[in-house]
Image (tube, rainbow, N blue to C red):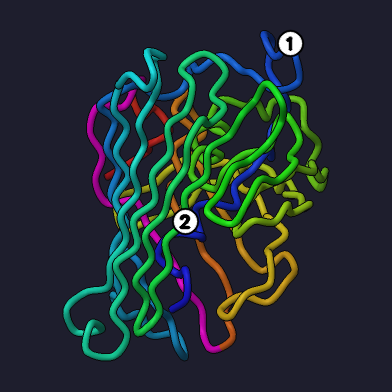
Amino acid sequence: MRKLLILAFFLIIEAFEKPAGYEDGCSIENTSFTGGEYAAYKIYYTLAGVYFEAGSVNFTCKYEQLSNKPVYHITAFGKTIPFYDHLYKVRDKYETYIDTGSLLSYQFSRSVVEGSTKKYENVRFNRDIQTAITDSGVFKVPGCVQDVLGAVYYVRNLNVNHVKVGDKVGFQLFLDNQLYNSYVRYMGREIINTRYGKFHAIKIKPLLIKGSMFETGEKMTVWVSDDLNHIPLRVQALIKIGSVKADLMEFNNLRWPLTSLIQK
């Protein structure tokens, strides 16, 4: 279940048109979320049409200060349920500190425990000279590069109203000391039924980075709420054996009413 509980959410990058106020190609006004927001998801593994609950992932967002700068401190924590702990224990924690004005990150870290594998990563972004400083060295990066967690909150402020179905939008992502070029494809709007309820949703497909669980290609589908919150509702992806699905199950302190919800 390599990166199963977290990375499904971290490929939702720049599927939408840049809204008014997007001036310098990087910074963007936050209109979709607020400090205090909380969202919880359940992860399901599917084989031969049968769903098995495999784990959970929770997201929190808090107002804080970092070096006297106002930031959103965002944390994502994913874990397997006790049954799977005996087979393949997962305890993944991702954190980012993003500027409340530009929504670009200053600092990113992750602590990954997946079976016998343990990995720790720390990244500090110097936006003035466009570098990423990690435990392995200093890397040159584009000024608009995102980390995988901050990108989820950045993209929620983008606008889909004038994008055509089938359009692709490229982006750059810094992960594991590497810069990735990828894209997402806008697939239009539709109504979906989730375990929480029935929603109006925006549908996108990201180009995946090849890994131990995912093959490269457009093999993941993401639905976000078709309202001002743009909160992820469902993520579904094919993996090497079967498929995985994550559904929104609980939330608190959304910035706006969840008007995309049709019926609970």
User: Residue at horizontal 79%, vertical 41%?
Assistant: 169
Q: Residue furthest front?
A: 137
Which residue shows up at 76% across the image and 35% down it? 142
Q: Residue 121 bears which disc, if any?
A: 2
**Residue projecting furthest to the left:** 82
Q: Tag 2: Cα neighbours inside 10 Å, few (<14), some, or many (≥20)?
A: some
Residue 94 x/y as whole percent = 39, 51
In the picture of the structure, the residue carrying the numbered disc 1 is 23
* Residue in front for this viewpoint, 129 or 236: 129
Helix, strand or loop for disc 1: loop
Q: Quadrant of residue 16?
A: top right
97 vs 87, left or right, is: right
* Prevalent SS, magenta region: strand
Figure quadrant of the C terminus: top left
Mark 1 and mark 2: Cα distance apart in space: 32 Å
Left or right: 254 as drawn, with respect to 128: left
Which circle's residue, 1 or 2, is located before the other in the chain?
1
Q: Which residues are magenta?
A: 241-256
Q: Does residue 131 appear to the left or right of 78 in the view shown? A: right
Q: Is residue 170 left or right of residue 81?
A: right
In the rendered image of this protein, does residue 26 appear above or below residue 39?
above
**Which amino acid, by three-letter code, is at mark 2?**
Glu
Q: Is residue 92 magenta?
A: no
Considering depth in this image, is 80 or 41 the residue closer to the camera?
80
